Image: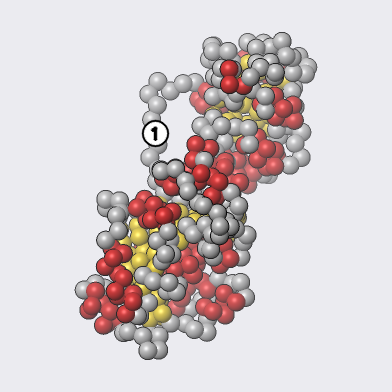
Amino acid sequence: MSSSQSQFNPSRPLPMPQAPSGLLARQSFIGFAADAATAALLESSFEGTLTNGGTFHVVDFRKTLAILSRIPCPQTLLVDLTGEEQPLSAMLELAELVEPGTNVLVIGPARELSFYRAVVNGMGVREYLAKPLTKPDVIKLLLPHIQPDPKPTVAPLTGHIIALTGARGGVGTTTIAANLAWIIGHDLHRHTILLDTDLQTGTAALALNVDPSWGLAAALQSPERMDSMLIERVAQPAGDRLHVLAGQESLTQRLDYPEGAAKTLTKALLGRFKFVIADTGARRLPFARDILELAQQRVIILDPSIMSLRNFERLTAQPANPGTRTTLVLNQAGRPYGLTQKFMEQSLSLKFDIVIPDLPRIIPKAEKFGEMGTSIKGPFRDAITKLAHQLGAAEPAERAFPKVAVNA
């Protein structure tokens, strides 16, 4: 391998821009460095590894994007963020050009810890290595991502898909789902996303006071492009460890999507978040039914009404994953003129796992002022916290730290 000595040289073995992209072969590796010294060090470190046309080019990040826009995306890509004043925005621009499954490695100046976590944990980048580079660090931290694994293994997805569904409309499913996600993300410090399965009239984003996403329906319709970087662009942040994924599509729009798209979405979500809290409502829309079938845990919410009792048996008859756990919640217990908890448990021949008392002054007031009900100490917060712990969301005993020390 040999480095370009100044700007990108079209005589190197990159495809010519004017060639039809459909006829170009996808290279195994392409690397870009902002200066010749960095390129030389990388080539020296990778010597003997890149035998299938691996190349390095000395260009800045803007020219890197221009080149990538004209060629097929390589299987492994190394880019240099040196000189970019807004590195997160630069990474989002790169994401538009990177195909799902591409192995992305990034080098650049030392940055704050939050940036490292954002690109590695949030955007699917395999590694971010801070300059100045050393050969031992490159060999230890970058080379393993380039060398082919003779025995590739697929890491099991360890996250949780928890689907909340109401026995009827108006039982408080969205309120409980939003507050559950808030407790897990904000108080228990677990990476959490609230997913609203009603793409047209859902209110989960409103419950957390964030804007709905405009790309969720499009992502479902093109599941082959769905990966952690796409999810990062579509999801809306509601805290350091809490995001919301909710749509607000036109009521006249058809929302057809390919079979298996919901499974692809949840797989991408679990690659980024530990907990996926899905608000599946009570309308049983197609997307909601798909998520319910994929969930490892279901939370069925009833209110003290005859209609909740009548619909409960039909809810439990819906298809589910083998071993799916069901948690039964009674909301608005003790509501005037409502059924008693004892009568409902006798009728169902089941005990409620979580009982949330009727709080007509607290919850509506909190929602009116855009606050979370769980931000107020009391029985509602206690019940949602108990639910979170019962669903396996206890705060981790140890915090994970990144593999690379990045100067603050």
Does any portion of residue 152 appear in the rendered image? yes
- Locate residue 217, reporting x and y percent: 54, 50
Circle 1 sits on which residue? 154
Residue at the image point whose x is 28% and y is 79% from the top: 344
Q: Quadrant of residue 287?
A: bottom left
Q: Residue at x 73, y 14 (%)?
A: 10
Q: Position of residue 83 (x, y in %)?
A: 76, 33
The N terminus lies in quadrant: top right
Crowd rating for badge 1 (residues with CA inside 10 Å; few <14, some 14–19, many 20+):
few
Q: In the image shown, does 142 or 157 lie closer to the viewer? A: 157
Quadrant of res 57: top right
Is residue 226 visible to us here? no
Q: Is residue 84 left or right of residue 208?
A: right
Q: Is residue 10 above or below residue 242?
A: above
Residue drawn 40% across and 89% down?
336
Residue 174 pos. (x, y %) = 48, 67
Which residue is rendered at x = 74% and y = 23% of the image?
A: 59
- Tell me if residue 159 comes above or below residue 65 in the rendering: below
Say above or below: 232 vs 127: below
Q: How many marks?
A: 1
Q: Helix, strand or loop at disc 1?
A: loop
- Asked whether 72 or 112 is in front, the reply is 72
Image location of residue 74, percent across then percent down: 57, 23
| Quadrant of the frame with the C terminus | top right
